[in-house]
Image (cartoon, rainbow, N blue to C red):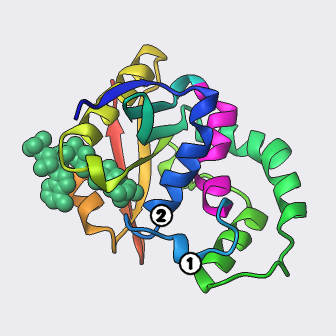
Amino acid sequence: MKVEIRNYKGKDKNKIAEICLLTGYSGEDASNFFKHKELLAEFYALPYLEHEPEICFVATINNEAIGYIIGTKDSVAFGKWAEENWFPPLRKKYPLNTDYATDFEKRIIELIHEGYKPKPELLDYPAHLHIDILPVAQGQGVGKRLIQTFTNKLRELNVPALHLEVGKRNTNAVSFYKKVGFHIIHEYEFSIAFGMKLV
Ligand SMILES: CC(C)(COP(=O)(O)OP(=O)(O)OC[C@H]1O[C@@H](n2cnc3c(N)ncnc32)[C@H](O)[C@@H]1OP(=O)(O)O)[C@@H](O)C(=O)NCCC(=O)NCCS
């Protein structure tokens, strides 16, 4: 099974949304938590494809996405763009009284209304990322290759550093980030912010 990595293309969008849901519960399938199956991706994946497709990459088998790494090179600019362009229609689509299946789904609707705000303690690491790979391709070095592809691209664009946040429950991802060169910037009650300097 040959896994290839290439730039994101528009035709990958639905697959990326699907992967986001299938890995969205601390690395496991989140489908059963959601009545609105696209909601998780609408917050965590699709805005990056819209805003910065040139730094989004997919891992593929037979040219079909089975994983991705997506993000922004400038979290402040991304937040401003999302506030002006991305969240307003979503807030109409999912008003705060929208029906939800679980507290998890309710929380994502709330996040859409709160908007994305970069945390001050992470501003020295201006880029951020999200990475998800389907179980079929996990544990074979694909995550490491995606991180290398993304960081190479950011270096090319002179981005000095990047961060990400991961839930403490997702112990697999925490181990992975430590292994591929990230250090802890900040520990919160339920999550950890990891960073990597690129220069
Ligand atoms: C977390 C994830 C991105 C890691 O990608 P991956 O392709 O499975 O990891 P790789 O095979 O590239 O592993 C790279 C290195 O990390 C190590 N590693 C990966 N998972 C690990 C684990 N659970 N425990 C210890 N080490 C681990 C590997 O041993 C490897 O080390 P090496 O370079 O010395 O061989 C992937 O498993 C995934 O998408 N999981 C589900 C979604 C998710 O949790 N995303 C992150 C949300 S914040």
Q: Does the residue labelled 2 lie within 8 Å of ligand 1?
A: yes
- From this view, report whether residue 147 is shown above or below residue 108: above
Q: Is mark 2 on a helix, strand or loop?
A: loop
Q: Residue 104 placed where, x, y %?
A: 58, 79
Q: Which of 20 and 129 is in front in this view?
A: 20
Say which quarter of the image contains residue 93: bottom right
- Residue 199 located left or right of residue 97: left
The quadrant of the rendering that contains the C terminus is: top left
Residue 42 falls inside the magenta stretch: yes
- Residue 58 located left or right of residue 111: left
The quadrant of the rendering that contains the N terminus is: top left
- Residue 66 located left or right of residue 180: right
Any part of residue 95 in sight: yes
Look at label 2 and name its amino acid.
Gly
Q: Nearer the viewer, residue 89 or 77?
A: 89
Residue tagged 1: 33
Q: Is mark 1 on a helix, strand or loop?
A: helix
Residue at 18% across, 43% down:
140
Look at label 1 and name its amino acid.
Phe
Query: What is the spatial separation of the Cα atoms under label 2 and label 1, in whole angstroms?
Result: 10 Å
Residue tagged 2: 24
Verify CB contact (< 8 Å) between mark 2 and mark 1.
yes
Q: What stretch is highlighted in magenta?
A: 39-53
Residue at 26% across, 68% down:
171
- From this view, report whether residue 188 is shown above or below residue 74: below
Say which quarter of the image contains residue 105: bottom right
Q: Does the residue labelled 1 lie within 8 Å of ligand 1?
A: no
Residue at 37% across, 64% down:
27
- Residue 162 located left or right of residue 33: left
- Mark number, residue 85: none
